[in-house]
Amino acid sequence: MSKKVLITGGAGFIGSNICEKLLHTPDVDLVRVIDNLSTASKENISHLIPNSKFEFVEGDIRDYSTCINVSKDIDIVLHQAALGSVPRSIQDPITTNQFNIDGTLNIFFAAKESNIKKIVFASSSSTYGSNQELPKLEKNIGEPLSPYAVTKLVSELYAKVFSSLYDFRFIGFRYFNVFGPKQSPKGPYAAVVPIFFRDMMQGKSPKINGNGEQSRDFTYVENVVDINISTLFNDQPDSWNNIYNVACGYKTSLNQLYQQIAELVGYPGKPVYGPERKGDIRDSLADISKAITLLKYHPKFSIQQGLQRAYDWYKNNQTFLME
């Protein structure tokens, strides 16, 4: 059956990559995007606007009436909109809360009121917080270490409550350090991978917070895109109303990441080390067996393959790296 899909945050890094592939997915009749462009760029989707199956609405999920309007005639929601970054949430917890909790509740309730039965939403590996066990299992979380982590945990709790109270099914994806094309290095809260690429491609030494031995499960964006799109046609009842890790299942230290990108770029320099960031998880590694078992998830791209593809994209879009 053909689907009409609403993507919140669809002009952002992950959302725009989902849009790109979704428009080439059979049995998708409509891709509607809502984004307020506060942390995204319309350039990410401008080439999609002429497509008759694509609709863009510049709007804010903090406004409930807007959420109701964009939910009309939609079959499923891919809720990607969020105000990201642990440091930003520490600096400004109120705005983070407004986007990630108020906005998410607006989208969930608008979906319920619009008779949308399924929502797939972006959670975060930050929900594991103080739990230092590796690999991270979905059922074992710790205390949140940042306001951002609190907001993502609350979104999971709201999804569970909605599924028990209403005719509503959800899938939540805890993303682990996603990187790839269209991820911007600009601004004080940019992610580490695009910053490393920008600085080394411009002959500068990037800064590493801490000693660089902290590790992450870096995940190429197309793995995330694929698992989101696969849920559109997922009719397996036991797979819904669940939270899943979305990652590769391998950990890489920041020092190792630096070395891999330096080799790709051909940069001979050394990083600059600075103080650790508050609120950061020290080590992160996902157990992805639940997603493999219930969603048939098999990440196509390793970190090495993903970094190569990201580098190829940044080389061909160097204006994207400009300040």
Image: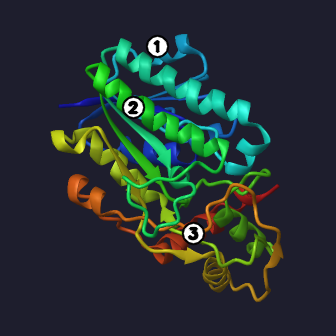
Corner quadrant of residue 66: top right
* Residue name at image x 57 percent, y 57 percent: 130
* Residue name at image x 28 percent, y 47 percent: 230
Number of other residues with Cα within 10 Å of mark 2, as a class: few under 14, some 14 to 19, many 20 or more: many
Residue under label 1 = 68
Location of residue 49 in the rendering, given as x and y in whole percent from the top left corner: 51, 33
Mark 2 or mark 1, whichever is nearer to me: 2
Q: What residue type is labelled 1?
A: Ile
Q: Is residue 7 left or right of residue 226?
A: right
Residue under label 3 = 283
Of marks 3 and 1, which one's residue comes earlier in the chain? 1
Q: Residue 250 carries which label?
A: none
As measured in the structure, the alpha-carbon distance from the residue carrying label 3 to the one carrying label 1 is 39 Å
Of marks 2 and 1, which one's residue comes earlier in the chain? 1
- Residue 58 appears in the picture as rendered: no
Q: Which of 277 and 20 is in front in this view?
A: 277
Q: What residue type is labelled 2?
A: Ala
* Residue name at image x 48 percent, y 49 percent: 17
Q: Which amino acid does label 3 sit on?
A: Asp
Of marks 3 and 2, which one's residue comes earlier in the chain? 2
Mark 3 or mark 1, whichever is nearer to me: 3
Number of other residues with Cα within 10 Å of mark 3, as a class: few under 14, some 14 to 19, many 20 or more: some
Q: In this view, does 267 lie to the left or right of 172?
A: right
Location of residue 265 in the rendering, given as x and y in whole percent from the top left corner: 67, 80
Location of residue 248 in the rendering, given as x and y in whole percent from the top left corner: 41, 67
Number of other residues with Cα within 10 Å of mark 1, as a class: few under 14, some 14 to 19, many 20 or more: some
